[in-house]
Image (cartoon, rainbow, N blue to C red):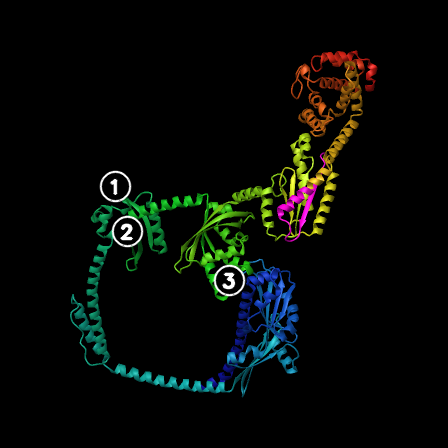
Amino acid sequence: MLRHGERTLARTGADHALSASARIDDLLRYQAEGLQAYAVDSAYWDATYAFMDGTSPDEAYLAAALPDPAMAIDILLFFDAAGRLFHREGLSEAGRLRSRALEKLIGPLLPFGEASPFPSGLLRLDDAVVLTAVAPIRTSEGKGPDRGFLVLGRLVDEERLQISRLTGLTMTLTSLAGKTDAATRSKVAELVREGRTVGNSEEGSQAWMLVTDLLGRPAFLASIAIPSEFRARVRGDVVGLVAALVIAFVSLLATTFLLFDRLVLTGLRQMGHEMAHITASPRLHGHLTERGDDEIAQLARCGNALIDALVEARNGEMQTSLLFRSLVDNIPGVVYRSRNDANWTKEYLSDTFEEITGYAVTDYLFRDDRSLAEIIHPDDLPRVRETLSRCHSQGEAYAMTFRIFRADGTTRWLFDRGQFLYDPTTSEVWFDGVMFDVTEERRAQEALTRSENRYRELFENAPLAFCELDCAPAREALSERLATDVGDLDDRCRTHRDEALEILARMKVLTANGAALKLLSASDAGEIEAGLVRIHGALSPEEIAGRLRMILATAVSTEADEVLCALDGRRIVARTRWVSLPGEAGGVDRLLCALEDITERKALEEKLLHLSLHDTLTGLHNRAFFEGQTALCETGRSDPLAVVVVDVDGLKIVNDTLGHDAGDSLLLRAATTLRKSFRESDIVARVGGDEFSVLLPRCSLEGLQAVLERLKRNIDDEAHGPALAPLVLSVGSAWRKEGERTLAQLITDADNAMYAVKIARRGLMTGRFRQRIETELARRDHFHDGHERRLTQILEALGGALGLDQKARDRLGLLARYHDLGKIVVGDDEKDRRRHVEAGARIAQAWSDLAPLAAAIASHHERHDGKGYPRRLAREAIPLEGRLLALALAYEKERSGREGTPLSHEEALERIVSQAGGAFDPALVDLLASLDPSLLDGCD
């Protein structure tokens, strides 16, 4: 045996060397896994995710993200999602020299478009070996899309790995990066061919192995030595083992001989007779004889102890039976045992059965002809059978609730709980259990359920939006942050608003009613919870700080108007009411938030406020706002100060001639001109019907002159526009230095200057207005091919036949020119054309030389029979000039063919005569017929 141990000694040392070499792989794997875990922690940091998006300053992030010095990281690389290098950082001198080499080697290994695996392990560079770890850059929840990859690199060698110290082995680790000697290269080639190798010598055993990198290239050559002392220890262990086996064998033979030398069988036979006599006694009286202190005596003592234990167990069983009966009698339910047969035959029923069901225990105990199923409600019986069958087949305990009919016909609810029991000796199956009357509890539960359903329905259908939120996660995160951050919470929220919002968004949304889902455009409470950052995105830093204080408070009851963002992008003005439910730890665990959408109300309030401070027509500030600003300017803070007063010339004549719509249009043009002429900081207000005032705070005299020059240019540009009513503005201004005249004196000076300009240019606007009307009338006459000239000749002939004086005939000439004056301000449809006579009369009344024509212009579409327009006048009620104009228009129309084929004098006269007494005055028709056609030859 010793020689056999010696022969195996060499093999044992070699095996130990090989198994020790395997520990190098384990150690390297553990280090790679640790580095990989650290890389994942760093890559799943939200700041890293933001850094790759370009939203975080490089310096600030890198200062906070540089690895822990204890991790001994030498190289830090960031790759974007397209595989391009985003950032490279060498954290040591050696790391800076080798970071570019690692970048070129690790880039092609990154698993773009895949979830795993991520290349982690050794990589051999030209002159170093790097332990690398790669992790995808995701959010703190580990969600994508991936923003890229984080690569950590640690330069490794024998000193850093410390394999000899950590494994307790005598080891040499040679790096294969860079130049190696011939012996090392030869050994590497041998290991590449044959794998791990072992050698034995008088000095001991030695194993060699190659440590490869991620690309399968040799990275380290490991040499593990097992010294000769190991063999000495093995030899000593073998000798000791052989000696121990010999001694044990001799002892066994001696013990066997002595045991059989004793009279064992005789003592055992006598003990058997005594045991038979004792067990024959109904109460187990007597004990075995104990002789001496040998093994037989010890066996007798054990037998006596067993007899005493049996007696004690029988007494305990009797006590247990009494205790069971006492417990069963005090259980407020029916304890039972049933056979697992078709009728569930009862082998035991406690006395409570009669109290609960109204039936005697004897009615169902050991009765094969009656079953408890007879009194179970028929709607519940299938469920009871299915539950018992399923639980029996699956070996599970059962629990169920069902209804029974009592003996008096009433219905009761029972809760039944039990389990199946199997007797392996008889193969019988029972089920034991207990039934409780839960009728009152069931009724209370049903009432509670109805109440809950009613209040839930009220909650769900309430017009007010309700949300219940769990604040514990947010409070925990906030407490951790406050424990490390020093400073005012408001300042913290102003400088780190996004971080504060993230803490606020950690609240859990427990419930949200339909109104809340509709208001926030969410499908469920989970969607609201996921979008809390977006919902609170419009809150100011002060509002966010107030919300965080609410989470830390011990009790909350507050109300505020806040701007929230719905998940569909709508901005909502909501009146929020918060009520807290205090938690056990003293802080707020839950918040009940009621949201009332007041967006429209706020918009209406803002609109009303705007209307109260702005002119409804022009959109400029009104007089009330202007006067409020003048009070502020009285303090002198706005000096040097200028005031400009503007008046719209001719607004009344435009209203009187073209109507108030044209007057409003003129005011809007004036407002637009003023708005684009002054600075944004200047206060432009409409203080009266055609009056505007402007305050120019902190305006130098040169600045005032520049503004007035710009205003003049804009007015001149507007004067060349297509509008019929020209824009003419009278402008006056005044300016003061610091501490000079009061603002009231300044406004008075500006008013006086404006009125001086207005007086100097009196009649300018009306002249321009008249000129534009004349131009428009001339354009229209050009299109009518001499209509005015022909009409003038006809009216001149009729006036002469009537014996009218020259003044009257001159008016008829003006009437021929201006009778369609109203068409320049009305539209082209039939309804507008019928209004042009009134518009023309209104315009004519605005000028003294045309005012006498107003009545004729207004009535030249009336008819002799009273069926004309606009006032349905008849006969002499129609002014003579109006009747003459109507007749002349009709004749000129027929002769010129303006709406058809031109007719001769006789044909035109025939048509007009046919309408005498209807459309035209018969006397004037006869007068026209009596005229010499040569007087009307202008119509030829």
Residue 435's disc is 2
> What residue is rendered at 65% in x and 41% in y?
692
Residue 396 x/y as whole percent: 35, 56
What's the CA distance linking mark 1 and mark 2? 19 Å
Q: Nearer the viewer, mark 1 or mark 3?
A: 3
Which amino acid is tagged 2?
A: Met
- Please say if the residues under marks 1 and 2 sit with CB atoms less than 8 Å apart: no
Q: Nearer the viewer, residue 482 or 531?
A: 482
Span of residues in magenta: 724-753
What's the CA distance linking mark 2 and mark 3? 63 Å
Residue 86 x/y as whole percent: 64, 64
Q: Which residue is mark 1?
A: 409
- Please say if the residues under marks 2 and 3 sit with CB atoms less than 8 Å apart: no
Q: Nearer the viewer, residue 576 or 589?
A: 576
Which amino acid is tagged 3?
A: Asp
Quarter holding the N terminus is bottom left
Q: Determine whether, in the image, residue 95 is placed left or right of residue 256.
A: right
- Among the 4 quarters of the image, the one containing residue 411: top left
Q: Which residue is mark 3?
A: 488
Could you classify mark 2 by the number of other residues whose Cα lies within 10 Å: few (under 14), some (14-19), or many (20 or more)?
many
Residue 772 x/y as whole percent: 75, 33
Residue 497 x/y as whole percent: 55, 58
Magenta stretch containing residue 743, yes or no? Answer: yes
Question: Is any atom of residue 203 visible in this view?
Answer: yes
